[in-house]
Image: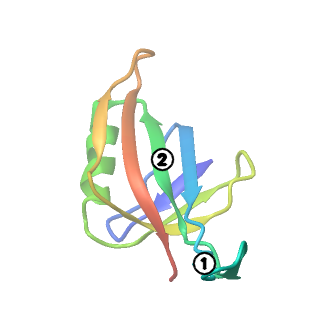
Amino acid sequence: MHQISTSAGPINPTVVTDYRVSREIRTREHPILGAAWSDFTFRPPGPRSGTLTLVFGTEGEAVTAVDRLLLGESFLFTTDALGLADMAFVVVPPGIDYALGAAGGWVVTVPYKEVTT
């Protein structure tokens, strides 16, 4: 089961079909003049960011999910599938897309960035 908690109520997609994650590497390289090597400053990686692709059975469920995700707050994504780690996130530009998918479900694509709560 997948759930996104919002102040307006939970969002429960039928399935999460795509969960894309990238993390920025924040290591800094410091070239040394006249040397064949560099020094490096190691820093923790950035937060997760990417897209969640959610599928809903009806257009009404998809529209409600989009409306709730446009509230301008942080959300909590929890799941017991795929070994995905739970996370708090915000929706980031360019914005949310939704469309009728080929299999008949309504597909909502959400760009996100992980935040701390």
Q: Which residue was labeled with disc 2?
A: 52
Q: Is residue 22 above or below residue 15?
A: below
* Disc 1 versus disc 2: nearer the observer: 1
Is mark 1 in CB contact (under 8 Å) with mark 2? Answer: no
Which is more N-terminal, label 2 or label 1?
1
Q: Is residue 22 above or below residue 33?
A: above
Q: Position of residue 56 (x, y in %)?
A: 42, 35
The residue sitting at 69% across, 82% down in the picture is: 39
Q: How is the image coloured?
A: rainbow
The residue sitting at 26% across, 69% down in the picture is: 72
Residue 12 seen from this side: no
Q: Is residue 9 left or right of residue 51?
A: left
In terms of secondary structure, where does tag 1 sit? Answer: strand
Q: CA distance from mark 1 to mark 2?
A: 38 Å
Q: Position of residue 35 (x, y in %)?
A: 69, 78
Q: Is residue 19 left or right of residue 101?
A: right
Residue in front for this viewpoint, 18 or 104: 18
Q: Quadrant of residue 84?
A: bottom right
Q: Position of residue 96 (x, y in %)?
A: 29, 47
Residue in front for this viewpoint, 50 or 90: 50
Q: Amino acid at mark 1?
A: Pro
Residue in front for this viewpoint, 53 or 113: 113
Q: Is residue 104 above or below residue 76?
A: above
Q: Position of residue 78 (x, y in %)?
A: 59, 60
Q: Which residue was labeled with disc 1?
A: 31
Q: Quadrant of residue 104?
A: top left
Q: Is residue 52 left or right of residue 62?
A: right
